Image: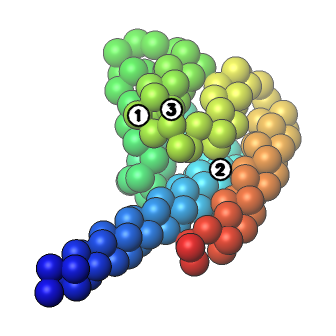
Amino acid sequence: MLKLTGAVLLFGACALAGVRYGMQWRRRQEYYEQLDGWLTFLQLEISYSRSSMVELLRQGGKEFPELTFLSGCEQRMAEGESFAHALSAAVAETSKELPEFEKGLAIIGELASTLGTTDMEDQQKVLRLAQKKLSLLTAEAREDRKKYEKL
């Protein structure tokens, strides 16, 4: 009886660990999709509304609440930091908190030097490049999820 109870508990623990591991793969894919959505949002807003970066961060934070670096960047800008410094610092802080998303956040960090400092066409080019890089990461995360989630 004790052996049977131990086997059931061991099976349950392994199943729970597998479910948790699968959730991490799903979360990674969803986070990258959120980043991609935010980049699309930025492209559209820069092209058509020409809002300030503070307003874009505020709107982006409402539409993409999982991207915590947006609110961090907005707070830093409210304290008087430049957009480039605030975005790179917020991304670095989020990378420390969420190391599993470091690759995607590094792509966003690269945007800090060009967003808000160049003309609209250059910003569009940089955003498209970042979006392509991010779509590769999303596809990789999707493949990893398919491969490892079933384990």
Q: Amino acid at mark 3?
A: Ser
Q: Residue at x 72, y 68 (%)?
A: 143
Closer to the chain start, of discs 2 and 3, is 2
Foreground: 44 or 8?
8
Q: CA distance from mark 1 to mark 3?
A: 5 Å
Measuring from the top left, give residue 4's x and y in whole percent: 22, 85
Q: Residues within 10 Å of mark 1 (few under 14, many from 20)?
A: few
Q: Nearer the viewer, mark 2 or mark 3?
A: 3
Quarter of the image where the C terminus is located: bottom right
Q: Which residue lies under the disc numbered 3?
A: 95
Circles 1 and 3: CB distance less than 8 Å?
A: yes
* SS for dot 1: helix
* SS for dot 2: helix
Measuring from the top left, give residue 21's x and y in whole percent: 46, 63
Q: Amino acid at mark 2?
A: Leu
Q: CA distance from mark 2 to mark 3?
A: 18 Å
Left or right, 76 with respect to 48, comes to: left
Label annotation for residue 97? 1
Q: CA distance from mark 2 to mark 1?
A: 21 Å
Q: Residue at x 55, y 16 (%)?
A: 85
Q: Which residue lies under the disc numbered 2?
A: 39
Q: Is residue 23 something one can see in this rendering? A: no
Closer to the chain start, of discs 2 and 1, is 2
Q: Residue at x 67, y 64 (%)?
A: 144
Colour mode of the rendering: rainbow
- Vertical relation: 75 (above or below) 132: above
- Vertical relation: 136 (above or below) 91: below
